[in-house]
Structure formats: C-alpha cells, structure tokens
Image (tube, rainbow, N blue to C red):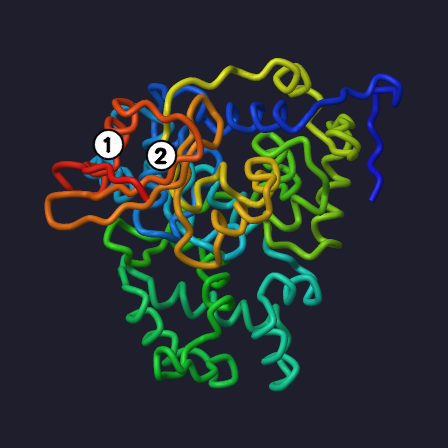
Amino acid sequence: MDVATPGRPSANVLRVDADQVLSFRLARSGLAVRGARGFAEAAACPASDFASDAALLALAARAEGVSREAYRRAVDTGDLVVAHVVRGAIHALAPGDLALYGRALIARDDGELVAQLGRQVRRLAAEKGFAPGEALEEVASATQDALANGRTLHKNELHEELRERVRAELMPWCRRCESHHVAPMLWRYATVKAGARLDSERRYTRGEPGPTPAASEAVRRFLAFYGPAGPGDFAEWAGLAKSHAGRLWEEAAGGLAEVRVEKSKAWLMSEDIGALESPTAAEGLRLIPPGDPYLQKPNRPLLAPDPKLRKRLFRPVASPGVVLRDGRLTGLWRVNVKGRKAVVTVEKLGRLPRGDLEEEAQRVAELRGAAEAAVVPA
C-alpha cells in the first residue's frame, strides 16, 4: 500500500541504515538512559506481561527506583494499568491508554473481527452459525455483569461466572483445563471490550477505560516507538486484519513522512525526522526481559540479523532475555530464583564488564523477590 508523503519530495527522502533505526527505537523505548520516570511514562509503550514479572523488569530497565512493592501498589491504585490490550495479550500500560490500545482497536466489521479473534473462533462461528460481533458483545456483557459491584475474580472464577451467563456454543471443550469455557481469544477480547483490568493478585476487576479515542492515534503511537515502519508492521504488532490496519494508516497518513531504510520504503511521523537523524546515544548495561517492548517483532530482524541467533532468541515459549550494552545486543540471559538467591545465567555474545553485569543481576534478583544474585556462564 502506498501512502502519500505531503511536504517531502521523493528526492529529499531521508535514507537511514539499520543501526540508525535501532538507535531511534531504543531511545524512544526509554532504554538509552535509565531515568527518573514514573510508571505511566515508563509504560508509554505497553510492556508485555506474559512471562513472570516481565512488565516489572521492563519498567525497571527504564526507570530509577522501581521496586516490586511500588509496582504492585501502582497496579492496585490505578497509577499503572495491567490488562488485556493489543493482540488480546496482557500488558502493563499508562492508565490513559487503556481505551486506545484496547477498545479502540476492536474491529467493528465481522470479517475483520474474526481475524483478531483467531482461527478457533472462526471455526466455531462457521460450525455454530453465530456472528463474531454478536458473540463478543454477549461475552463482554457477561464479563461486566460478573465483575459488577466491585467484584474481583481470578481467571478460573471468571470462567465459572461466564459458564452461567454464556451460551454453550461459545464454550468449546478445553483438554488442558478438562472443562468447557469461552474460547480463549473471545474471552480475552471480551475483557478488552468490558474495560476490565488486573490487580496485583492477578484478579480481574472493572476498570475505567474512559472515552474511546480515534483508533488512528494508535498508528502514530506505534510509529513513535517502532518507526520507520509500514502498515503491515502495524497490522502485525496490533493484531489487526490488514484491511483494518490499512484504513487506520490512511487516516494518519497526513502526518507521515517517507523514509528509506536501506532499500526499503517506510514511514515515520514527520515531527520525528530530526530524532531519527540524531537519536539519543545509549549508555550502560541492561538486562531486558523476554517480551520487552524493544524485543517485539518490528525490531527482531534488526537486533539479531543472523537467523540462527534470532531463532534461539525469539522462541514460541521460554525465550531468554537480552543483555544490552550501550544499546547493542551483547548476550542472552535467564534467571532461576531459588529461595533467597537468583541465579542469572548469561551467554556472552560480546564483552560484558563483570561489575556492571553483577549490578544489573542484583537489580533483577531484588525485583524477583530474592536477596542476592549469582551470575554464572551459560
């Protein structure tokens, strides 16, 4: 899909290389310099919380003074929101962005919605003869009802409540759970539509998503963190049908400028061209957790150009974390907490100062609830 680039003649298109793009994205992600940021600012780009404590570790890599206790307190007071948003996955994000990355991105067209809800829901809809939008509305209403009057429910408790409120056609048999429950992507997106969030105990509760903003704002936010990029990159990151993502992209196109990354055409917010030309230099060492915003799909081929390394780094499950030194990939790491000690196993891909590595490992240990860290080679 071609996008017009007002005000920037093709002869003057900025040309950048992969290193320049990574430096821009690293700085925009908040990883160039660990600063005195609040939780909401550190979570401006939603941080995946799929792996254990992933969002906590991601925010601590960006902000000074983060502790496990302060993180849990922020989640419970609403200063930080943990909820299902983009792709139906759990993320930590700024409170004001819950509606933008959640409800605003839910497709209204059934064909596009079923692309969001996935193959299982597509198959069920065809077999049982229901419309995806109607099914989502039913489960979202049931979710709101189950969480009414300030109730908080763990996932299994929520499923039990939904069994009493949702028709059987929407609840296939789950062999892992050995029970019938609402199809996974359907109930996850129902929590999105219902504006539900999670507390520090991983219980679902009714949130306050606020007014639904224009969904095209998500394109601008995406490009602020992952630009230069194209509409296909946005569709994949947000979990949208290409037609849905394309319409949102067109709505945002007036503020975009064309950029050439190596030989490929991409786009960036016009106001960010200067930041791309001269990104903030990265400094220091960071242990970045699996699922960190900087490790999402737009960055992977640039961060790890070697396909074999990329395959080891970005696994379907149990991916390692990444060691960054001055913004560059210099190692892989895993942590195993045993009582009061966290054993951090590091595979070096470059030179890593021992003192800096031990300091970061100790930070991870304390965030994971351990008193001390031991760094061991892979």
Direction from residue 146 to residue 217 in the image, left or right: right
**Counting residues from the N terminus, which is met first, the one under dot 2 or under dot 1?**
2
Q: Which mark is residue 219?
A: none
What is the quadrant of the C terminus in the image?
Answer: top left
- Name the residue at 35% across, 78% down: 177
Q: Position of residue 263 (x, y in %)?
A: 79, 32
- Pick the quarter of the image with the N terminus: top right
The residue positioned 50% from the left and 57% from the top of the image is: 88
Q: Looking at the picture, does residue 203 appear above or below residue 133? A: above
Label 2 crowd (10 A; few <14 / some 14-19 / many >=20): many
Between marks 2 and 1, how big is the CA–CA gap? 9 Å
The residue at which mark 1 appears reads as 363
Q: Please, what is the three-letter code of the amino acid marked with disc 1?
A: Arg
Locate residue 125, reporting x and y percent. Answer: 62, 79
Q: Position of residue 35 (x, y in %)?
A: 36, 19
Q: Are marks 2 and 1 in contact (CB under 8 Å)?
A: yes
The mark found on residue 287 in the picture is: 2
The answer to which of 49 and 152 lies nearer the viewer is 49
Crowdedness near tag 1: few (<14), some (14–19) or many (≥20) residues, C-alpha within 10 Å = many
Q: Is residue 221 left or right of residue 67?
A: right
Residue 164 vertical placement versus 233 (above, below): below
Indicate the amino acid at tag 2: Leu
Q: Secondary structure at mark 1?
A: helix
